Image (tube, helix red, strand yellow):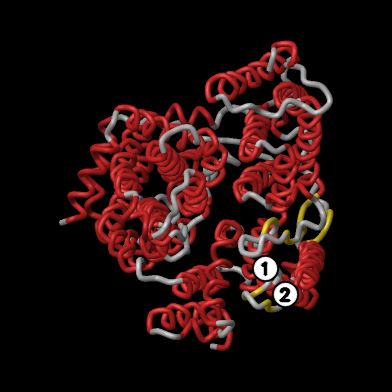
Amino acid sequence: MEEINALFHGFSVAMTPFNLMLMFTGVTLGVVIGVLPGLGGANGIAILLPLTFTMPPTSAIIMLSCIYWGALFGGAITSILFNIPGEPWSVATTFDGYPMAQQGRAGEALTAAFTSSFIGAFVAVVMITFLAPLVAKFALKFGPPEFFSVYFLTFCSFIGMGKGSPWKTLTAMMLGFSLAAVGMDTVTGQLRLTFGFSELMRGFDFLVAVIGLFGIGEILLSMEEGLSFQGSNARIDFKIVVQTWKKLPKYWMTSVRSCLVGCWMGITPGGATPASFMSYGIAKRFSPDGAKFGTGQIEGVIAPETAAHAAGTSALLPMLSLGIPGSPTAAVLLGGLLIWGLQPGPLLFVEKKEFVWGLIASMYLGNLAGLIIVLTCVPLFAAILRIPFSIVAPLIIVICAIGAFTVHNAMLDIWFMMFFGVVGYVFKKLDYPMAPMVLALVLGDRAEDSFRQSMLISQGNLSVFFTNGLVGTIMTLGLIMLFWPLVNKLR
Amino acid sequence: MSSEQKENPAGAADTHAVISLRAMEIIIAGLLLAFGLTIAYASYQLGAGWAEDGPRAGYFPFYIGMIISISSVVTLLQALRNRSINADMAFVERGQLKLVCAVLLPALVYVLIIQWFGIYLASAIYMAVFMIWLGHYAWWKAVLLGIAVSASVFVMFEVWFQVPLHKGALYNPLAVFGF
C-alpha cells in the first residue's frame, strides 16, 4: 500500500492551480500538434522543451507529458474525420473510423475512439503505478554489465520485432550510435569523429535530429501526396456520447485484449504504432463481426485506439524506472529529464520521490483532462485542418527552425535540422526505421559507458555479461531477439 | 482559381518516375557503406584497441562503423539481386518531386536568410512568399500574416520567455530597437 500513499502525495504535488493550468494548456497544445501534419508527439515536445527550462522540473514534465497525451488523442480526430492519420499510430483507426464518419456516425466513432484511448491509458497508468516502483527497486542492484544487458535487449528487440528488413534496422540503429559518438569522448576526453570541425565538438543533439527527421521529413512526405482535405463535419453532443458509452461495455473483451497488447508493446520497445496494428488484427480475428471489419465497425476503432494509448503510456515505465525509453517520444522526455539535471533510472524513485509521483499522478489527471477537452472541442480542432496547406506548411517549418535553434542557440543546428529532414524523407520512403535511430542517438553515450565500465571490471573479458543468472538471462534474451529474423527465415 | 489547384500548384499529375526504388536503394546503401567505412577508419586512427586503462576512444565507434558497413553491403546486395516488379516502382515521380522541391528549396533559402538577417525577418519573408507563390493569396494578406507570425514569435520568445533567437550574421534588422 506504500504506492497508494505515494500516489496520493503525488496528487497533492500535481494538483496546484499552476500545474493544473499547465495540464490543460499541454493537452490542448498536444491535440493541435496531433492534428497538424508534420508535428507529432516526439518533435512537438522537442520543440517546446527549451521553453520549459525556466519552470520547476515537476511542472515542466507535467506539461510535456500532457502534450504527449494530447497528441495521442489528436491523431484519432484526423483519422476519423479526414482519413488522414495525424500520427502513425492512428493509421489503423482510419480503417473503420473513416467509413463510420462517411456513414454519418462520426460522433459515435470519435466518442468510441476517445473513450477507448482513455481506458487504454488508464490501465497503463495503473500498471505503471504498481509495477514501476518494483522494477526500480529491482534495478537498484544493477551494475554496469546489467545495465548494458538491458540496453542490449532493448536494441535487439527492435531487430527481432521490426517488420521491415532487419539489416536496415541495424544500419539505422548504428547510424544513431555513430552520431551519438561524435564529439568529446566522456571517458578519455579525446575528440572523436569531428574531422577537424570545432563546431562538431558539441556533438549532434538528438532533439535537432528528432525535429528534422519527424518534422521536416513529414512535411516533405505530406507535400508529396498533394494534400487535398475532404473531411466530414463532426459535432459531438451529449446524447451521442451517452448512446455510445452504452454500447461500449459489450466490447469489453476487445478492450482487455487491446490493453494487454498495448501494455506489452509499450514496455518492450515495440511502440504504439505496431501495437495498434496488432490489436486491430487480433480484434478482427476474434470478433464475431470480424469479416465486416473495414466497413465501419465500432470495434475496429476501439481496438487500435485502446492499444495505441496503452502502449504510448506504458512506454514511460522503462523510461522512469530504468532510464530506457520505449518510444521516440519517451526518449525526448528522457532528454528533458537529463537537461533538468535529473538522472532517470532506479535512483529517481529514491531520490526524487516528489517528481516521480507527481508525474504519475499527473498521468491520471492529464488523461482525464484530455478526454474532457477532446470530447468538447472536436469542431474547433477539426477546423485547424481546414487552414490551407500553404499557410500551415511554412508555419510548421518556421516553428521547427526556431525549435532547432533554441536547443543550443546554434545556427548550425538549423542546417542540421534541414539535413535530417531530407534524411527522414528518404529513409521513410526506403523503410529505414527511425525509432531505433533516435533511441540509439539518445542512449548511445550511456550504452557505451556501461559497456566500457563492464569491460574495465572484467579487464576486457566478454564473459562478464554471463557471470550471473540475471545478466546472463537478459543477454540471452537479447541474442534470441537479435537472431530471431534469421530463425524465422530458416523455418 | 479552384481550391484544388490552390493546393496543387505544381501539378502532381506527372507520374513519370525520376528514379526507381531499386536505384535509390542502391545509392543510399552505397552512401551508408562509405559512411560506415569512414567512421571505422577515423576511429581506427584514433585508436580502436586497448590501452592500459581500458578500451580506447575509438574502440566502440570502430565496431559501429564496421556494423554499418556490413549491414549496408547486405542491403546493397539484396537491392542488386532484386528483380521483382516492386523494385521498378518509382522512388519519386516527377510531379511529386516538383511538389517536394517547392517546399524544400524555399526552406533552404529561408535558412540562409536566417543565417544572414536573423529569424524574425526571414520568417516574415518566408511566410509571405510561400503564401503568394504557392497559395496565390493577395500580397497584402500574405505580408500581414508574415509580419503577424514574426511579431508573435518575437513577443513569445524575446519578451515572454526571454529566450533570444538568432539575430543575423550580416545585418540585424532589430538592432534599431536595441535587440
Which residue is identified by label 2? B48
Q: Is residue A431 visible?
A: no
Q: Where does residue B57 sit, x and y in percent of width and height? A: 69, 68
Up-down relation of residue B42 to residue B138 (above or below): below
Which residue is identified by label 1? A171
Q: Where does residue A432 sit, x and y in percent of width and height? A: 65, 62
* Disc 2 residue type (three-letter): Ala
Question: Label 2 to label 1, Cα distance in Å?
Answer: 20 Å
Residue shown at the point (70%, 23%) measured from the top left: B120
Q: In this view of the protein, which residue sits in the foreground, A351 or B128? A: A351
Packing grade of label 2 (10 A; few <14, some 14-19, many >=20) is many
Q: Which mark is residue A388?
A: none
Q: In this view of the protein, which residue sits in the foreground, A280 or A287? A: A280
Q: Where does residue A349 sit, x and y in percent of width and height? A: 32, 55
* Disc 1 residue type (three-letter): Thr
Quarter of the N terminus of chain A within the rendering = bottom left
Q: Which chain is indicated by disc 1?
A: A
Q: Which chain is indicated by disc 2?
A: B
| Of the two numbered discs 2 and 1 in the rendering, the one whose residue sits closer to the viewer | 2
Up-down relation of residue A339 to residue B110 (above or below): below
